[in-house]
Image (spheres, grey):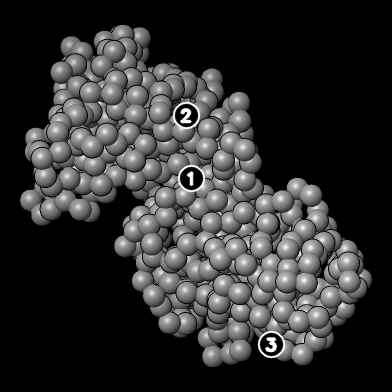
Amino acid sequence: MLNLGLLTVQGNLGLLTVPVALAKMLNLGLLTVQGNLGLLTVPVALAKMLNLGLLTVQRNLGLLTVPVALVKMLNLGLLSGSRELGSFDGSSSFGKNVEPGSFDGSRELGSFDSSRSLGKNVDLFENRSRVDVGSKISKLDLGTKDGNGTSGKYVKQQNDTTCAVKMGYWKKGQRFQGLDPVTGMLISGKILGQAGKVTGVNKDCYNVQLDNDGWTGWFNLATLRELSEVNENIEMIILFSNDAVSLAKNKEIQTWIDNKVFEVVPNEGQRAISVRWIVTEKTKDDGLVIKARLVARGFEEDTTSLRKDSPTCSKESVRLLVAFASSKQWACNTVDVKSAYLQGDKIEREIFLKPPSEFNDGNLWKLKKTVYGLCDAARAWYMRVKSALNSLSVKMCSLDNSLFIWKRNGKLEGLICIYVDDFLWAGNATFKKCVIDELQKQFLIGSSASESFTYVGLRIKSFSDGITIDQTQYASSLVPVTISSARNMQRKSQLSESEKTAYRALVGQLNWMATHTRPDIAYDTCELSVAFSKATVTELVRLNKLVKRVKNESLQLFFPRLHSFETCSLECYTDAAFANLPNGGSQGGLIIFLKDDSGKNVQSSGNPGDLSV
């Protein structure tokens, strides 16, 4: 309709050809058009066409009743009322007549709900950009048009990222896109799981998360036209106003320039890698902040001979640092490096980038450093940090390549753990002056914190009698699997595919907590993991109970101040049980404590409920 500019309908007065002045319709509330029978003034209750099936309008020659075959309109570009008056064949059939300007429903004029396909009420005749699936989309307007251009949201995609698919079984994590049968608007999202039985009437129904507004829920993929799968390398940005995004992009490019990441060279046909923008929002103390990151599409490069490994500190190293800091009465501290990869080592090979469209002047960018998206960027950054620490006489631990130790006169005076661009350190004043302060001169630091902060998901707090580590904030974010009352009665029933997906994800979250700060739930998570392949509603209920327990019990690891860390010893407790798991397997376990030179087992002097380490 929007592309052809004409709308042909069958009324009781004959054919009427309508020039589509849709932009005025929203502003004026009325659409005045020129037909072959004269002027026609239409009260805009058009949004209800889908729900009512018929549109009755007041014409200066009388009433005109229009069969609304709107599905045909999008497929053919024309609305042809070939059916008898009073009937309607579309995605929903209601067949009601209404008086001029009236509508049936609780929604306001100009809105509609297309079987929840868009996840929210949107104006039926907002100016939409209709595009072919699989084509390169520079901008898809999801908002209204004003005098300054796009004022809503936008989506950017790369070409060659889609492939046509037949309706069949979709797996969790797959991405899809298609055209809404009513508006012709591009709809895309991610599959969260199966919603209906694979062999039932709802086999095409899935739980999805839509990109345009983040709506999550039940969706029938069969309602989309030109449905296709979107490959993982698709660029999908759905964010905010253009001004905010442009500001974030300009800031990112300036960071590249400040760090001397590239030099501009003439385009002489060199093999070049394309780039993409990743736009995200981060929560700061002063609200949401939009961040843009320019990423090279590293998969376009031959990486066969490149070394890609990059170590990160283990949880054992973090605990060792915290235990030593507690013993020495040092405060734990953290710093993170801003735009870390752009501060990495110089690149040793020749790579050219195609600049993003906003900054493309026909030249290419020759990289001086590894950037986000290249397979060896993380390693280049690690080697840069390692070199900087070695220059300050900080030595790498032989058991963990991301744990570094600083000694002076044979005495350990500082420790630092590296997790990509996040540093955790503890030491005396000399260590801070000779190492940390020097590092801050070599790298651009984003933020720092001391005594109470979060490091790679672990909240670390320092007290007068020791240090604690907990994941209380993470635990509060856990969401139990929804079980209906009817489903709750089917305790012996096998889990559906969508339930299995949710079950596995939640057990994984609990297992991560069990291995970091909640050893008290280690057996429970192991038992639930073993039962996964044949899990029933009974296990799902037990899983939800465990989640409730974790959220209600605020436990933490407590590291008391040991008398003499140099003379500490390890004390290990083990136990095992035969065939105690649901599948008949056996379970063993162990826990290791540090023991000081007093000969006493380390006990917590903190709050009840603390787990001593």
Labels 2 and 3: the sequence-earlier one: 3
Q: Amino acid at mark 2?
A: Leu
Where residue 234 sits in the image (x, y, percent)? 37, 57
Asked if the residue under mark 1 is in contact with the one under mark 3, i.e. CB atoms within 8 Å, the reply is no
At 80% across and 86% down in the image, what residue appears?
A: 85
At 78% across and 72% down in the image, what residue appears?
A: 37
Tell me the element at label 3. Answer: loop
Quadrant of the image containing the N terminus = bottom right
For residue 111, side relative to residue 285 (left or right): right
Q: Which residue is mark 1?
A: 517
Where residue 311 sits in the image (x, y, percent)? 24, 42
Residue 345 in view of the camera: no
Quadrant of the image containing the C terminus = top left
Q: Which mark is residue 82?
A: 3
At 47% across and 50% down in the image, what residue appears?
A: 139
For residue 352, side relative to residue 60 (left or right): left
Look at discs 1 and 2 and give the one toward the viewer. Answer: 2
